[in-house]
């Protein structure tokens, strides 16, 4: 007795005692039950069953008495229909349970995909918001066009100003050349001044007044 107790282990289940039922493939049996349930749920099954019951009634009513295998009250037919109903109900329930399992798996998969899609959508929304914030600090096309137009106008103005300055410088150089070739008769001629000549030449006096010109 003690040896038997020592051999028993609590971390392992006991082996079932009594009659061992034959093992079968549950998946194959489930597919078979679904096939029967689908067949019983069609119009062909109802038509065939109606035809068989009608023939049964006619044969056991109009046939000779020695050929009738189920006379009125049709006890055997009642037994067959009872057996059919007793087996059809569990088969239909089994098919429904398998379909419910498939629906649950599909629902879990749809939920997982919806969660992943929601996470992706939120990530894209955050990225788009970040891009919009970043683009708010970037120069737009209209701004660049306006700045380029302003720079072009400034360059045109600078070019025109440079041309005027060069033209005036050339005129001044021409006047100086003509003055250098002109004979000096001792008479001081006042030369018209322009913008390039700047301010009038100041005398070295402390008060900064212009020198007096000799009267001719």
Image: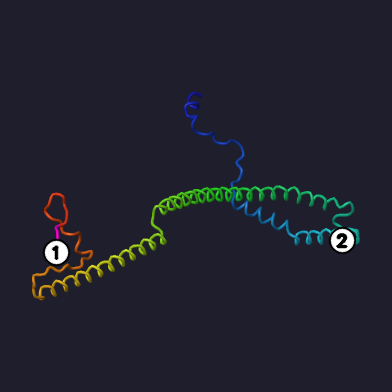
Give residue 54's mark.
none
**Colour scheme used in the picture?**
rainbow
Farthest residue to the top: give it: 2
Query: Where does the magenta region start and end?
Result: 211-216
Of the residues tagged 1 and 2, which is closer to the observer?
Answer: 1
Badge 1 local density, few (<14 within 10 Å), some, or many (20+)? few
Determine the secondary structure under disc 1.
loop
Image location of residue 105, percent across then percent down = 57, 49
Q: Which residue is mark 2?
A: 59
Residue at the location (66% across, 54% down)? 34
Q: Depth check: 136 or 113 in front?
A: 136
Q: Is residue 189 left or right of residue 120?
A: left
Residue 212: in magenta span: yes
Residue at the location (83% across, 58% down)? 53
Q: Which residue is mark 1?
A: 215
Q: Main secondary structure of the magenta part?
A: loop
């Amino acid at each position: 007795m003690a040896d038997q107790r020592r051999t028993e282990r609590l971390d392992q289940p006991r082996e079932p005692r009594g009659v061992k039922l034959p093992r079968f493939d549950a998946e194959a049996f489930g597919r078979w039950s679904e096939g029967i349930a689908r067949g019983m749920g069609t119009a062909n099954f109802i038509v065939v069953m109606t035809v068989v019951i009608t023939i049964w009634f006619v044969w056991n009513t109009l046939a000779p008495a020695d050929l009738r295998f189920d006379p009125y009250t049709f006890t055997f037919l009642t037994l067959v229909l009872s057996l059919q109903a007793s087996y059809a109900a569990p088969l239909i329930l089994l098919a429904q349970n398998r379909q419910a399992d498939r629906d649950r798996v599909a629902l879990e998969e749809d939920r997982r995909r919806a969660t992943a899609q929601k996470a992706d959508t939120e990530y894209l929304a955050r990225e788009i918001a970040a891009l919009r914030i970043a683009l708010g600090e970037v120069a737009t096309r209209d701004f660049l066009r306006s700045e380029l137009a302003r720079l072009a106008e400034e360059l045109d103005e600078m070019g025109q100003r440079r041309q005027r300055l060069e033209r005036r410088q050339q005129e001044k150089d021409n006047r100086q050349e003509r003055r250098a070739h002109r004979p000096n008769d001792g008479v001081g001629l006042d030369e018209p001044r322009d913008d390039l000549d700047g301010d009038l030449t100041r005398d070295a006096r402390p008060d900064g007044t212009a020198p007096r010109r000799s009267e001719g």
